[in-house]
Image (cartoon, rainbow, N blue to C red):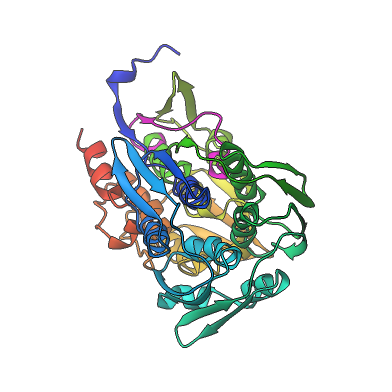
Protein backbone atom coordinates (compact mmCIF):
# COMPACT_ATOMS: atom_id res chain seq x y z
CA UNK A 1 0.00 0.00 0.00
CA UNK A 2 3.03 2.24 -0.02
CA UNK A 3 3.25 2.87 3.74
CA UNK A 4 6.30 2.22 5.87
CA UNK A 5 5.06 -0.06 8.65
CA UNK A 6 7.88 1.11 10.92
CA UNK A 7 7.05 4.80 10.55
CA UNK A 8 4.05 4.72 12.92
CA UNK A 9 3.43 3.43 16.43
CA UNK A 10 2.51 -0.24 16.82
CA UNK A 11 0.99 -2.39 19.52
CA UNK A 12 0.34 -6.09 20.00
CA UNK A 13 -3.33 -6.90 20.52
CA UNK A 14 -4.01 -9.00 23.63
CA UNK A 15 -5.13 -12.57 23.04
CA UNK A 16 -8.85 -12.90 22.41
CA UNK A 17 -10.71 -13.30 25.70
CA UNK A 18 -13.53 -15.12 23.95
CA UNK A 19 -11.23 -17.60 22.22
CA UNK A 20 -9.13 -18.17 25.35
CA UNK A 21 -12.14 -19.13 27.48
CA UNK A 22 -13.21 -21.69 24.91
CA UNK A 23 -9.74 -23.11 24.34
CA UNK A 24 -9.13 -23.54 28.09
CA UNK A 25 -12.41 -25.36 28.70
CA UNK A 26 -12.09 -27.64 25.68
CA UNK A 27 -8.46 -28.44 26.53
CA UNK A 28 -9.54 -29.43 30.04
CA UNK A 29 -12.32 -31.63 28.65
CA UNK A 30 -9.93 -33.63 26.44
CA UNK A 31 -8.88 -35.14 29.80
CA UNK A 32 -5.35 -35.29 28.43
CA UNK A 33 -2.47 -32.85 27.86
CA UNK A 34 -2.90 -29.87 25.52
CA UNK A 35 -1.05 -26.64 24.78
CA UNK A 36 -2.56 -23.20 24.19
CA UNK A 37 -0.33 -20.54 22.66
CA UNK A 38 -1.17 -16.93 23.37
CA UNK A 39 -1.27 -14.89 26.56
CA UNK A 40 -4.09 -13.28 28.49
CA UNK A 41 -3.86 -11.86 31.99
CA UNK A 42 -7.37 -10.43 32.04
CA UNK A 43 -9.57 -11.06 35.06
CA UNK A 44 -12.21 -13.10 33.22
CA UNK A 45 -9.69 -15.60 31.84
CA UNK A 46 -8.09 -15.84 35.29
CA UNK A 47 -11.50 -16.77 36.71
CA UNK A 48 -11.85 -19.59 34.18
CA UNK A 49 -8.35 -20.83 34.98
CA UNK A 50 -9.12 -20.70 38.71
CA UNK A 51 -12.38 -22.61 38.30
CA UNK A 52 -10.78 -25.31 36.13
CA UNK A 53 -7.92 -25.64 38.61
CA UNK A 54 -10.45 -26.14 41.40
CA UNK A 55 -11.91 -28.97 39.31
CA UNK A 56 -8.57 -30.78 39.27
CA UNK A 57 -7.23 -29.49 35.94
CA UNK A 58 -3.50 -28.76 35.95
CA UNK A 59 -2.64 -25.51 34.18
CA UNK A 60 0.93 -24.25 33.98
CA UNK A 61 2.85 -21.61 32.07
CA UNK A 62 5.04 -22.61 29.16
CA UNK A 63 7.02 -20.49 26.73
CA UNK A 64 4.42 -18.53 24.77
CA UNK A 65 1.34 -19.94 26.43
CA UNK A 66 -0.15 -22.52 28.78
CA UNK A 67 -0.06 -26.29 29.24
CA UNK A 68 -3.44 -27.75 30.21
CA UNK A 69 -3.78 -31.27 31.62
CA UNK A 70 -7.33 -32.43 32.31
CA UNK A 71 -6.50 -36.07 33.06
CA UNK A 72 -7.48 -35.66 36.73
CA UNK A 73 -10.60 -33.55 36.29
CA UNK A 74 -13.06 -34.47 39.00
CA UNK A 75 -16.45 -36.08 38.38
CA UNK A 76 -19.59 -36.98 40.34
CA UNK A 77 -18.74 -34.87 43.38
CA UNK A 78 -19.97 -31.80 45.22
CA UNK A 79 -17.90 -28.66 44.55
CA UNK A 80 -17.76 -24.98 45.41
CA UNK A 81 -16.34 -22.45 42.95
CA UNK A 82 -15.79 -18.69 43.06
CA UNK A 83 -15.78 -16.81 39.76
CA UNK A 84 -16.37 -13.20 40.83
CA UNK A 85 -17.89 -11.17 37.93
CA UNK A 86 -17.12 -13.38 34.89
CA UNK A 87 -20.47 -14.08 33.23
CA UNK A 88 -18.80 -16.06 30.45
CA UNK A 89 -17.06 -18.34 32.95
CA UNK A 90 -20.35 -18.96 34.76
CA UNK A 91 -22.47 -19.66 31.69
CA UNK A 92 -19.81 -21.68 29.88
CA UNK A 93 -19.09 -23.91 32.87
CA UNK A 94 -22.57 -24.69 34.18
CA UNK A 95 -23.39 -27.23 31.41
CA UNK A 96 -19.86 -28.63 31.74
CA UNK A 97 -20.39 -29.17 35.46
CA UNK A 98 -23.61 -31.00 34.63
CA UNK A 99 -21.85 -33.21 32.08
CA UNK A 100 -19.23 -34.10 34.72
CA UNK A 101 -21.97 -35.10 37.17
CA UNK A 102 -21.04 -32.36 39.61
CA UNK A 103 -23.31 -30.42 41.95
CA UNK A 104 -22.67 -27.58 44.37
CA UNK A 105 -22.40 -23.80 44.58
CA UNK A 106 -20.80 -21.06 42.50
CA UNK A 107 -20.09 -17.83 44.36
CA UNK A 108 -20.34 -14.75 42.15
CA UNK A 109 -19.93 -10.99 42.42
CA UNK A 110 -22.78 -8.63 43.20
CA UNK A 111 -23.31 -7.40 39.64
CA UNK A 112 -23.16 -10.90 38.11
CA UNK A 113 -25.69 -12.14 40.67
CA UNK A 114 -28.09 -9.50 39.33
CA UNK A 115 -27.24 -10.21 35.68
CA UNK A 116 -27.96 -13.94 36.04
CA UNK A 117 -31.69 -13.90 35.40
CA UNK A 118 -34.80 -15.97 34.71
CA UNK A 119 -33.78 -16.58 31.09
CA UNK A 120 -30.58 -18.23 32.33
CA UNK A 121 -32.45 -20.37 34.85
CA UNK A 122 -34.95 -21.50 32.22
CA UNK A 123 -32.15 -22.48 29.82
CA UNK A 124 -30.70 -24.89 32.37
CA UNK A 125 -34.14 -26.21 33.26
CA UNK A 126 -34.64 -26.97 29.55
CA UNK A 127 -31.46 -29.10 29.49
CA UNK A 128 -32.37 -31.04 32.64
CA UNK A 129 -30.33 -29.15 35.21
CA UNK A 130 -31.59 -27.50 38.38
CA UNK A 131 -29.93 -24.10 38.66
CA UNK A 132 -31.11 -21.32 40.98
CA UNK A 133 -29.96 -18.19 42.80
CA UNK A 134 -29.49 -18.53 46.54
CA UNK A 135 -28.11 -15.87 48.90
CA UNK A 136 -25.36 -14.50 46.67
CA UNK A 137 -24.41 -17.77 44.99
CA UNK A 138 -25.67 -20.00 42.18
CA UNK A 139 -26.71 -23.49 43.27
CA UNK A 140 -26.63 -26.24 40.65
CA UNK A 141 -27.25 -29.97 40.27
CA UNK A 142 -28.48 -32.39 37.63
CA UNK A 143 -26.67 -34.69 35.23
CA UNK A 144 -26.36 -33.50 31.62
CA UNK A 145 -26.93 -36.32 29.13
CA UNK A 146 -26.60 -36.59 25.39
CA UNK A 147 -29.59 -36.50 23.09
CA UNK A 148 -31.87 -33.89 21.56
CA UNK A 149 -32.28 -30.45 23.13
CA UNK A 150 -34.54 -27.53 22.27
CA UNK A 151 -33.26 -24.30 23.82
CA UNK A 152 -33.65 -20.54 23.54
CA UNK A 153 -30.66 -18.27 23.02
CA UNK A 154 -32.69 -15.08 22.70
CA UNK A 155 -30.92 -13.11 25.44
CA UNK A 156 -27.35 -14.46 25.31
CA UNK A 157 -25.36 -17.01 23.33
CA UNK A 158 -23.10 -17.93 26.26
CA UNK A 159 -25.39 -20.62 27.70
CA UNK A 160 -25.67 -22.21 24.25
CA UNK A 161 -21.88 -22.17 23.82
CA UNK A 162 -21.54 -23.81 27.24
CA UNK A 163 -23.92 -26.59 26.17
CA UNK A 164 -22.04 -27.08 22.90
CA UNK A 165 -18.75 -27.39 24.81
CA UNK A 166 -20.22 -29.82 27.36
CA UNK A 167 -21.94 -32.33 25.06
CA UNK A 168 -18.82 -33.91 23.48
CA UNK A 169 -17.94 -35.25 26.96
CA UNK A 170 -21.07 -37.42 27.19
CA UNK A 171 -21.47 -40.82 25.58
CA UNK A 172 -24.18 -40.06 23.01
CA UNK A 173 -24.12 -37.84 19.95
CA UNK A 174 -26.39 -34.85 20.35
CA UNK A 175 -28.61 -32.42 18.44
CA UNK A 176 -29.52 -28.91 19.58
CA UNK A 177 -32.51 -27.04 18.18
CA UNK A 178 -32.06 -23.32 18.79
CA UNK A 179 -34.83 -20.75 19.08
CA UNK A 180 -34.25 -17.00 18.86
CA UNK A 181 -30.48 -17.09 18.67
CA UNK A 182 -28.57 -13.83 19.20
CA UNK A 183 -24.83 -13.27 18.74
CA UNK A 184 -24.63 -16.11 16.24
CA UNK A 185 -21.03 -15.18 15.54
CA UNK A 186 -20.03 -16.23 19.04
CA UNK A 187 -21.75 -19.60 18.57
CA UNK A 188 -19.82 -19.96 15.32
CA UNK A 189 -16.61 -19.15 17.20
CA UNK A 190 -17.39 -21.99 19.63
CA UNK A 191 -17.96 -24.41 16.75
CA UNK A 192 -14.73 -23.30 15.04
CA UNK A 193 -12.79 -24.01 18.23
CA UNK A 194 -14.60 -27.35 18.54
CA UNK A 195 -13.19 -28.33 15.15
CA UNK A 196 -9.66 -27.65 16.37
CA UNK A 197 -10.24 -30.15 19.17
CA UNK A 198 -11.46 -32.84 16.79
CA UNK A 199 -15.23 -32.68 17.35
CA UNK A 200 -17.34 -32.94 14.21
CA UNK A 201 -20.48 -30.91 13.74
CA UNK A 202 -23.05 -29.71 11.26
CA UNK A 203 -24.92 -26.49 11.90
CA UNK A 204 -27.29 -23.94 10.48
CA UNK A 205 -29.28 -21.14 12.06
CA UNK A 206 -31.81 -23.49 13.65
CA UNK A 207 -30.01 -26.64 14.76
CA UNK A 208 -26.60 -28.04 15.59
CA UNK A 209 -25.52 -31.69 15.43
CA UNK A 210 -22.44 -32.81 17.37
CA UNK A 211 -20.51 -36.06 16.97
CA UNK A 212 -17.25 -37.36 18.43
CA UNK A 213 -15.08 -36.63 21.45
CA UNK A 214 -12.40 -34.09 22.26
CA UNK A 215 -8.88 -34.94 21.12
CA UNK A 216 -5.56 -33.78 22.53
CA UNK A 217 -4.24 -30.89 20.46
CA UNK A 218 -2.27 -27.64 20.36
CA UNK A 219 -4.08 -24.40 19.53
CA UNK A 220 -3.09 -20.77 19.13
CA UNK A 221 -5.32 -17.92 20.29
CA UNK A 222 -5.31 -14.86 18.03
CA UNK A 223 -5.56 -11.19 18.99
CA UNK A 224 -8.73 -9.67 20.41
CA UNK A 225 -10.77 -7.56 17.97
CA UNK A 226 -12.94 -6.20 20.80
CA UNK A 227 -9.87 -4.65 22.43
CA UNK A 228 -8.25 -3.67 19.13
CA UNK A 229 -11.34 -1.71 18.09
CA UNK A 230 -10.44 0.97 20.63
CA UNK A 231 -7.03 1.50 19.09
CA UNK A 232 -8.41 1.32 15.56
CA UNK A 233 -10.57 4.32 16.40
CA UNK A 234 -7.71 6.07 18.20
CA UNK A 235 -5.57 5.72 15.07
CA UNK A 236 -8.43 7.03 12.97
CA UNK A 237 -8.98 10.10 15.14
CA UNK A 238 -5.49 11.01 16.34
CA UNK A 239 -2.36 9.32 14.94
CA UNK A 240 -1.96 6.50 12.44
CA UNK A 241 -0.90 3.23 14.05
CA UNK A 242 -0.46 -0.49 13.40
CA UNK A 243 -1.99 -3.38 15.36
CA UNK A 244 -0.20 -6.73 15.43
CA UNK A 245 -1.50 -10.17 16.34
CA UNK A 246 -4.95 -10.07 14.73
CA UNK A 247 -6.03 -12.87 12.40
CA UNK A 248 -7.36 -11.43 9.16
CA UNK A 249 -9.64 -14.48 8.72
CA UNK A 250 -10.81 -14.43 12.35
CA UNK A 251 -14.28 -15.71 13.28
CA UNK A 252 -14.51 -13.13 16.07
CA UNK A 253 -17.76 -11.19 15.53
CA UNK A 254 -16.26 -7.88 16.68
CA UNK A 255 -14.06 -7.84 13.61
CA UNK A 256 -17.17 -6.21 12.12
CA UNK A 257 -16.03 -2.91 13.65
CA UNK A 258 -13.46 -2.54 10.85
CA UNK A 259 -16.26 -2.57 8.25
CA UNK A 260 -18.25 -0.06 10.32
CA UNK A 261 -15.19 2.18 10.58
CA UNK A 262 -14.72 1.99 6.83
CA UNK A 263 -18.38 2.84 6.24
CA UNK A 264 -17.88 6.06 8.22
CA UNK A 265 -14.80 7.09 6.26
CA UNK A 266 -12.06 5.34 8.23
CA UNK A 267 -9.02 3.81 6.55
CA UNK A 268 -7.79 0.36 7.60
CA UNK A 269 -6.15 -2.51 5.73
CA UNK A 270 -4.04 -5.60 6.40
CA UNK A 271 -0.44 -5.77 5.24
CA UNK A 272 1.43 -9.01 5.94
CA UNK A 273 -0.55 -9.82 9.07
CA UNK A 274 -0.50 -6.25 10.40
CA UNK A 275 -3.66 -4.18 10.70
CA UNK A 276 -2.77 -0.71 9.45
CA UNK A 277 -4.95 2.13 10.71
CA UNK A 278 -4.55 5.53 9.07
CA UNK A 279 -5.78 8.84 10.39
CA UNK A 280 -8.94 9.92 8.61
CA UNK A 281 -9.44 13.43 7.29
CA UNK A 282 -13.21 13.37 7.71
CA UNK A 283 -15.81 10.99 9.16
CA UNK A 284 -19.52 10.89 8.37
CA UNK A 285 -22.61 9.36 9.93
CA UNK A 286 -23.47 5.71 9.32
CA UNK A 287 -25.98 2.99 10.21
CA UNK A 288 -24.97 -0.24 11.97
CA UNK A 289 -26.95 -3.14 13.43
CA UNK A 290 -25.04 -4.17 16.56
CA UNK A 291 -27.57 -6.70 17.85
CA UNK A 292 -25.06 -9.54 17.51
CA UNK A 293 -22.01 -7.45 18.51
CA UNK A 294 -23.02 -5.50 21.64
CA UNK A 295 -19.43 -5.29 22.94
CA UNK A 296 -18.52 -2.79 20.22
CA UNK A 297 -21.59 -0.62 20.82
CA UNK A 298 -19.65 1.80 23.10
CA UNK A 299 -16.79 2.33 20.64
CA UNK A 300 -19.30 2.73 17.77
CA UNK A 301 -21.06 5.41 19.82
CA UNK A 302 -17.74 7.21 20.21
CA UNK A 303 -17.12 6.95 16.46
CA UNK A 304 -20.59 8.40 15.88
CA UNK A 305 -19.82 11.34 18.19
CA UNK A 306 -16.90 12.34 15.95
CA UNK A 307 -18.69 11.61 12.66
CA UNK A 308 -20.50 14.53 11.04
CA UNK A 309 -24.24 14.04 10.69
CA UNK A 310 -26.69 11.43 11.90
CA UNK A 311 -25.71 7.91 12.92
CA UNK A 312 -28.18 5.12 13.73
CA UNK A 313 -27.03 2.28 16.00
CA UNK A 314 -29.45 -0.66 16.28
CA UNK A 315 -29.50 -3.11 19.17
CA UNK A 316 -29.90 -1.06 22.34
CA UNK A 317 -32.03 -3.86 23.84
CA UNK A 318 -28.83 -5.89 24.26
CA UNK A 319 -27.11 -3.26 26.44
CA UNK A 320 -28.98 -3.19 29.74
CA UNK A 321 -27.81 -6.48 31.27
CA UNK A 322 -24.07 -6.02 30.85
CA UNK A 323 -21.39 -5.00 33.36
CA UNK A 324 -23.42 -1.81 33.57
CA UNK A 325 -26.59 -0.51 32.00
CA UNK A 326 -24.54 0.32 28.92
CA UNK A 327 -27.19 2.38 27.20
CA UNK A 328 -27.43 4.68 30.23
CA UNK A 329 -23.62 4.83 30.41
CA UNK A 330 -23.30 5.71 26.72
CA UNK A 331 -26.00 8.37 26.96
CA UNK A 332 -24.36 9.95 30.02
CA UNK A 333 -20.98 10.17 28.32
CA UNK A 334 -22.43 11.51 25.07
CA UNK A 335 -24.11 14.22 27.13
CA UNK A 336 -20.79 15.05 28.78
CA UNK A 337 -19.33 15.43 25.27
CA UNK A 338 -22.10 17.82 24.27
CA UNK A 339 -23.46 15.37 21.69
CA UNK A 340 -27.19 15.21 20.99
CA UNK A 341 -28.94 11.86 20.68
CA UNK A 342 -32.34 10.19 20.66
CA UNK A 343 -32.96 6.70 22.02
CA UNK A 344 -36.09 4.74 21.16
CA UNK A 345 -37.36 1.50 19.60
CA UNK A 346 -34.13 -0.51 20.05
CA UNK A 347 -31.98 2.14 18.38
CA UNK A 348 -29.80 5.07 19.29
CA UNK A 349 -29.60 8.05 16.94
CA UNK A 350 -26.48 10.16 17.46
CA UNK A 351 -25.98 13.59 15.92
CA UNK A 352 -22.22 13.95 15.87
CA UNK A 353 -19.43 16.04 14.50
CA UNK A 354 -18.45 18.54 17.19
CA UNK A 355 -17.67 16.83 20.53
CA UNK A 356 -16.20 18.86 23.38
CA UNK A 357 -13.50 17.83 25.89
CA UNK A 358 -14.90 15.93 28.87
CA UNK A 359 -14.01 13.61 31.76
CA UNK A 360 -15.47 10.14 31.12
CA UNK A 361 -17.73 8.28 33.56
CA UNK A 362 -16.93 4.58 33.23
CA UNK A 363 -19.86 3.26 35.28
CA UNK A 364 -17.23 0.68 36.42
CA UNK A 365 -17.63 -1.03 33.02
CA UNK A 366 -14.48 -1.97 31.11
CA UNK A 367 -15.99 -1.42 27.65
CA UNK A 368 -17.29 2.03 28.60
CA UNK A 369 -13.99 2.98 30.24
CA UNK A 370 -11.90 2.05 27.18
CA UNK A 371 -14.17 3.54 24.53
CA UNK A 372 -14.69 6.91 26.18
CA UNK A 373 -11.04 7.17 27.25
CA UNK A 374 -10.21 7.05 23.55
CA UNK A 375 -12.74 9.84 23.02
CA UNK A 376 -11.26 11.95 25.82
CA UNK A 377 -7.74 11.48 24.51
CA UNK A 378 -8.77 12.44 20.98
CA UNK A 379 -10.13 15.67 22.50
CA UNK A 380 -6.82 16.42 24.26
CA UNK A 381 -8.05 15.29 27.70
CA UNK A 382 -5.73 12.89 29.52
CA UNK A 383 -7.89 9.91 30.56
CA UNK A 384 -7.86 8.76 34.17
CA UNK A 385 -6.81 5.20 34.94
CA UNK A 386 -9.78 2.98 35.82
CA UNK A 387 -9.18 -0.46 37.34
CA UNK A 388 -12.32 -1.90 35.76
CA UNK A 389 -10.40 -2.49 32.49
CA UNK A 390 -8.66 -5.43 34.19
CA UNK A 391 -11.71 -7.50 33.29
CA UNK A 392 -10.61 -7.73 29.66
CA UNK A 393 -7.46 -5.61 29.04
CA UNK A 394 -5.40 -4.91 32.19
CA UNK A 395 -2.66 -2.90 30.45
CA UNK A 396 -5.02 -0.84 28.28
CA UNK A 397 -4.07 2.49 29.85
CA UNK A 398 -0.36 1.67 29.69
CA UNK A 399 -0.66 1.01 25.96
CA UNK A 400 -2.79 4.12 25.51
CA UNK A 401 -0.15 6.28 27.17
CA UNK A 402 2.71 4.64 25.28
CA UNK A 403 1.04 5.06 21.90
CA UNK A 404 0.26 8.72 22.48
CA UNK A 405 3.64 9.74 23.89
CA UNK A 406 5.20 9.50 20.46
* Range shown magenta: 236-255
Q: Is residue 239 magenta?
A: yes
Q: Is residue 127 magenta?
A: no
Please report the residue visible at 61 percent of the width from the left and 54 percent of the height from the top.
169
Where 133 sits versus 81, above or below? below
From the image, which quarter does the C terminus lie in? top left
**Tally of numbered tags:** 0
Is 164 left, or right, of 209 in this rendering?
left
Q: Is residue 227 above or below residue 37?
A: below
Q: Residue furthest bottom?
A: 135
* In the image, residue 329 above or below residue 178: below
Residue 364 at x, y percent in the picture: 36, 67
Q: Quadrant of the N terminus?
A: top left
Q: As rendered, which of 9 and 134 lies closer to the eye?
A: 134
Where residue 128 sits, quadrant-wise, is: bottom right
Q: Nearer the viewer, residue 288 or 187?
A: 187
Residue placed furthest toward the top = 2
Q: Is residue 280 left or right of residue 115?
A: left
Judge whether residue 286 can be spotted in this image: no
Residue 319 in the image, given as x and y percentages of width and height: 56, 64
Q: Percent position (x, y) of residue 265? A: 53, 33
Q: For residue 132, what is the image quadrant?
A: bottom right
- The residue shown at (50%, 73%) is 77
Q: Is residue 171 visible?
A: yes
What x and y, as percent, mark residue 209?
76, 48
Q: Is residue 167 left or right of residue 406?
A: right
Residue at 45% across / 60% down in the picture?
334
Amino acid sequence: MGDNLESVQALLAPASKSEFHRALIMAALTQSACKIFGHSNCADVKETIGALTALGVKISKIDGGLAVDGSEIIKNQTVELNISESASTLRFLLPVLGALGLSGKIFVGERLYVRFNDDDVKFYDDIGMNVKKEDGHIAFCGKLLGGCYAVSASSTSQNLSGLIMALPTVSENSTIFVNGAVSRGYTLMTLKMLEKFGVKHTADNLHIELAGKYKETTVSVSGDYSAAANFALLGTLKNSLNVLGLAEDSAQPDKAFLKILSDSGGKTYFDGGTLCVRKAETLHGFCADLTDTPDVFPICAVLAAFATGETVLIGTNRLKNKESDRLAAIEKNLSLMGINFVSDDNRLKIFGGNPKPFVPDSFSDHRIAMAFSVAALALAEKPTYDACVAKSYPNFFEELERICQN
